[in-house]
Image (tube, rainbow, N blue to C red):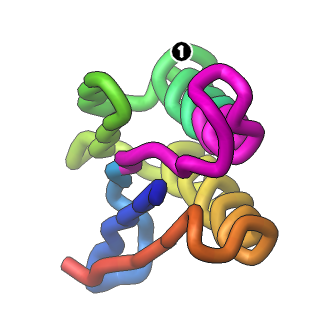
Amino acid sequence: MIKADFYRSSEGSLLGFEVSGHAGLADKGQDVCCASVSSAVMLAANTITDAFKVNAKVKVEENDIMLKLGNDSKGEGDKVLLGLLTHLYLMQDEFPGYVMVRVHDR
């Protein structure tokens, strides 16, 4: 199962995420669920860090990616994270039992 954990400040802005796991819907290289989640996550991370030049820490490992916005990050980073969160909620509905999205308050 792919687990997507988002972190939210007490003011309601998104601070970052960690996405880990493998859907297991199909064999490696054939799993449309994994490919869809991976593509959306990488698009969001690259948009935040490369397109908008938002201060963020990114850590990528096998089947795991973490992004944490810097303390001085406002605006675009939070909006991109909200878009990713919304997209992954839709994927959770599309692939029940294969994607789980959670939001944690900090």
Instruction: Answer whether residue 52 is magenta in the image.
Output: no
- When the figure is inspected, residue 31 is found, relative to residue 95, above or below; the finding is above
Q: Residue at left 76%, top 69%?
A: 90
Q: Residue at left 43%, top 70%?
A: 13
Quarter of the rendering occupied by the C terminus: bottom left
Q: Position of residue 24 (x, y in %)?
A: 55, 48
Q: Report the front residue among 60 and 14.
A: 60
Q: Does residue 57 appear left or right of residue 45 in this picture?
A: left
- When the figure is inspected, residue 38 is found, relative to residue 46, above or below; the finding is below
Q: Provide the secondary structure element on which disc 1 rests.
A: helix
Tell me if residue 43 can be seen: yes
Q: Position of residue 102 (x, y in %)?
A: 42, 76
Q: Position of residue 55 (x, y in %)?
A: 33, 29
Q: How many marks?
A: 1
Q: Position of residue 104 (x, y in %)?
A: 30, 79
Q: Does residue 71 appear left or right of residue 16 in this picture?
A: left
Q: Residue at left 51%, top 31%?
A: 45
> Label 1: which residue?
50
Q: Does residue 83 appear left or right of residue 70 in this picture?
A: right
Dot 1 crowding, Cα within 10 Å, few <14, some 14–19, many 20+:
few
- When the figure is inspected, residue 97 is found, relative to residue 21, above or below; the finding is below
Q: Quadrant of residue 87?
A: bottom right
- When the figure is inspected, residue 19 is found, relative to residue 40, above or below; the finding is below
Tell me if residue 86 can be seen: no
> Could you tell me the amino acid type at mark 1?
Asp
Magenta segment:
19-38
